Structures are given as structure tokens and as C-alpha cells.
Amino acid sequence: MPSFELLYGNYWFTVNVEDFVIEITNDGSVCALCLSTYESEWILGDAFMRGWYNIHDHTNAKIGFHTLDASVKSKPTESTSTPTETLPYVEVNTTFLIFGIDAVTFLITVSLAVIITGVVVIVVIFCFVEFMTRALRSQTAGKGSKLTAHYKDSGEESISLVILE
């Protein structure tokens, strides 16, 4: 991306790439654009203000800039004219990526995965309960349940009790 000049309060400011783009990853493969708009105003933000002393005069609704001694920024130059051409339209990709997927697609995919996983778990639990119920019924079908109680007498007799369904 190229540098550009900004006319602010009758002064031209050179805005370098370092003033409006920051690296998100260490290898520089993902960057963020530090320019935004609010209604009809442009917001440059603190990335632009690096390398400047800036003084905010809230009473008089002014802001002043002066370069730091160690800054590589050029000093603002007083304007002798105003721009005669409009800026060209530049399309900027501002999508937010999560694991290389835009945020909306990522959230939809995760939501669907959670729903599908929940349905599968419910079906597996239902099938397991149904299987166990049928297995228990087939073991006791027509046989009844046999409960043996031992009653020991002096003659060591035992009593068996059978409960039928």
C-alpha cells in the first residue's frame, strides 16, 4: 500500500504505511488496516499518532501535532492550496478471519457441528436404552422372574417363590 498525504487544519501530513497498517502475525502474512469511518468522518487512531506529540485542546476543539525528535516522520507542511481531485475508490478486504475462515462462516459451521453432535448423542443414548430394554424383555419373556428365598428350618427346608409377569 502506498503512503498518502492528509490535509488537516491547513497542514499536509504524510501518512506512511506504518501509520495505518499494523502486522497481526510475526511473518507479516496478516495485517490490519487502522483506518475507519464514523458517519462522514475518518478515524486515523493511535497508529497514525505514533511518532508525534499530540496536544488535545478540548476547550477550543483543536488538536496540535509536532514530530518527536527521534521520529522518522516529516514535519507537516503548510498548505498553499486545496485538493482538486477526489480520492480514487480503493477496495479493502476487511473480513475478520478465524482459522482462515471468515467469522460468520466459522460461527455457522461451529453451530451446525454442535447441533449435529447433540442430535447424534441423543440418538445413540436412545438406541442404547431401547436395546437394553429389549434385551431385558427377551431374557424374561414367558419365563417370569424367579425369586428364591431360603427359609431354614430345623429340617433345612427351602422355599422357592416364582413371580410371573
Image (cartoon, grey):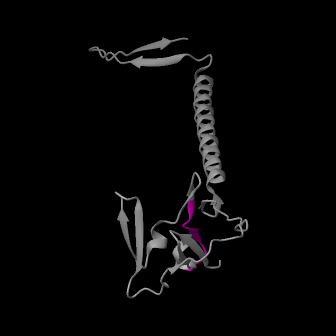
Whether residue 22 is visible here, answered yes or no, is no
Q: Residue furthest front?
A: 80
Q: Is residue 10 above or below residue 104?
A: below
Residue closer to the observer: 29 or 74: 74
Percent position of residue 118, x then y: 59, 39
Looking at the rendering, which quadrant does residue 155 occupy?
Answer: top left
In the visual, does 106 lie left or right of 86? left
Q: Is residue 85 left or right of residue 100?
A: right
Q: Verify whether residue 95 appears in magenta.
A: no
Q: Residue 72 placed where, x, y %?
A: 47, 87
Q: Residue furthest left?
A: 154
Rendered-image quadrant of the C terminus: top right
Location of residue 87 by image quarter: bottom right
Q: Determine the main secondary structure of the stretch shown in magenta.
A: loop
Write down the region rendered in magenta: 27-36
Foreground residue among 48 and 21: 48
Question: For the image shown, how many numbered marks are present on the structure?
Answer: 0
Of residues 112 and 74, the one drawn nearer to the viewer in this rendering: 74
In the rendered image, the quadrant that contains the N terminus is bottom right
- What residue lies at 66% left-to-right and 52% top-to-bottom? 105
**Residue 138 seen anywhere in this rendered image of the structure:** yes
Q: Which corner quadrant of the image does residue 62 belong to?
A: bottom left
Q: Residue at x 39, y 88 (%)?
A: 70
Residue 19 lies, with reference to residue 143, above or below; the image says below
Tell me where residue 5 appears, x and y as whole percent: 59, 76
- Residue at the location (58% across, 21% down)? 140
**Residue 30 highlighted magenta (yes or no):** yes
Taking the spot 72% from the left edge, 70% from the top edge, the residue there is 85
Depicted 78 relative to depicted 92: above or below: below
Residue 145 x %, y %: 51, 18
